Image (tube, rainbow, N blue to C red):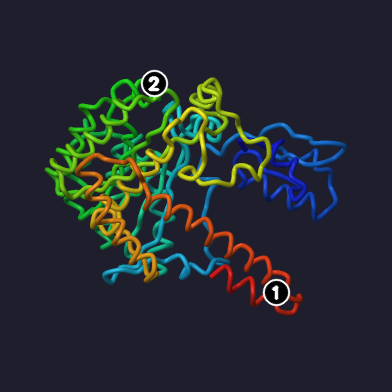
Amino acid sequence: TLLPEQTLENPYVDIVVVGEGERTVVELTHALKHGRPLEEVKGIGFKKDGIRLTPPRGVITDWDSEVELDWSHIDYQKYIRGREGYKNIPFMSSRGCLFKCGFCYNAKVNNQQWRGWSVSGTVKELDKLLDMGINSVTFLDDLLTVDIERLKEIVIYLSKKGVRVSFDGGFRIDSVRHESLYKTLNDTGCRHIQFGAESGSRNILRRIRKGITVEQIIDSAKLTKKYNLGATYNWMIGFPGESQEERQETLQIIDKITEINPNTSHVIVIYSPYPGQALYEEAVRFRWEPPKRLEDWDKPREEADYAYVNDIWHLRCIVLSCYFNFAYNVPSYDVKVNNLLFRLVANVMKVLSKLRWKLKFFGLPIECVLLIKGRGILDNILAKKLTWRLRLPSHKMKHTTQGVGS
């Protein structure tokens, strides 16, 4: 959707879907099955005497009549997360966002539109999960607070059904003006919500067009404390032109929020430019060169290099220190890892991270270099092993790929 032409330049890609795929994939499948011209399918790109893009397809706006989930061909047991006697599954009741945050993909991917099921439409889809024995739902919507009354009705319905509710995203900081929402969450037994705060710097918040204030961020901590809610705050550092002072303001507000409501967790990521963002062109002006090929987008944002960041390892150290100090094994974030080796490494990182965060010292990040570089080496070993396994004779392929997928 963001870079259809560049994606199609890759020799392994024949056709791409641009925008929403629910309607497109059906028409595309029928066209391929019956030999109809691909030019007739809206919202795709394909190779024919070069690269061609068909006219765009509009987004689905009437979800109640056009969007319905069919679980009959899905082994939903694979997606259940069981803990404390609960069977949890992730769920999205809407798509898109109305706001203009300068770092977000939504402006281009969803055309800055929000749409979703009504209360009755959402309940209809949730009932399918309840019929499968699900008793815990985590909402993953990009924006849930666009309609406060809709959200309250959904939460109340699930509470009456004995379903535990949590939210991994979807809460705007400025929703703190709707205190009744947080009272409802408390009354219905909600345990966790997630905010996109992004920065503790007034200047950065203004530059990234977040549309919130530092005061509202502080108020959110007071409100979650008042109504006994755990909360995760998502932050970003490494914006083009960001100063050390602005970065420190984010670290300081994390400490302040934690002091107000100890039942919070915090995750910092390094800003990564993507086409369609308002900040994308700003990154280019700061000497960043966008990847020229599909495969050059492969690095996770914490491992990529950005020309406008002079102290990238300093940023990586902040990111990892925040994670192991405020997210790993923190009840409000609830990160559980079964791998014994990772747990041993993580426990060492947690001790070091606490010390670093207390001193606000993120120089000489030896343990961070070892962790990131070590993971890269392990990934390369596993990738070579996977390549070798996938070259097995075809009669063993099914068993092998299932093992990889699991």
**How many labels, in total?**
2
Q: On the rendered image, what quadrant is the N terminus found in?
A: top right
* Element under disc 1: helix
Q: Residue at x 61, y 35 (%)?
A: 2
- Residue at far bottom of view: 395
- Image coordinates of residue 223 in percent, x first then y, are 16, 39
Q: Residue at x 48, y 58 (%)?
A: 375
Task: State the residue in front, 199 or 86.
Answer: 199
Q: In the drawing, does residue 393 fall left or right of residue 352?
A: right
Task: State the residue in front, 175 or 347.
Answer: 347
Tell which circle, 1 or 2, labels the residue nearer the N-terminal end: 2
Residue that badge 1 annotates? 397
Q: Which of the 4 image quadrants contains residue 70? A: bottom right
Task: State the residue in front, 332 or 149.
Answer: 332
Task: State the residue in front, 193 or 283.
Answer: 283
- Image coordinates of residue 365 in percent, x first then y, are 36, 46
Q: Residue at x 39, y 48 (%)?
A: 120
On the question of residue 157 being in view, the answer is no
Looking at the image, residue 171 lies above or below residue 277: below
Looking at the image, residue 276 lies above or below residue 380: above
Three-letter amino acid code at disc 2?
Arg
Residue 207 circle label: 2
- Image coordinates of residue 342 in percent, x first then y, are 38, 65
Q: Residue at x 30, y 53 (%)?
A: 324
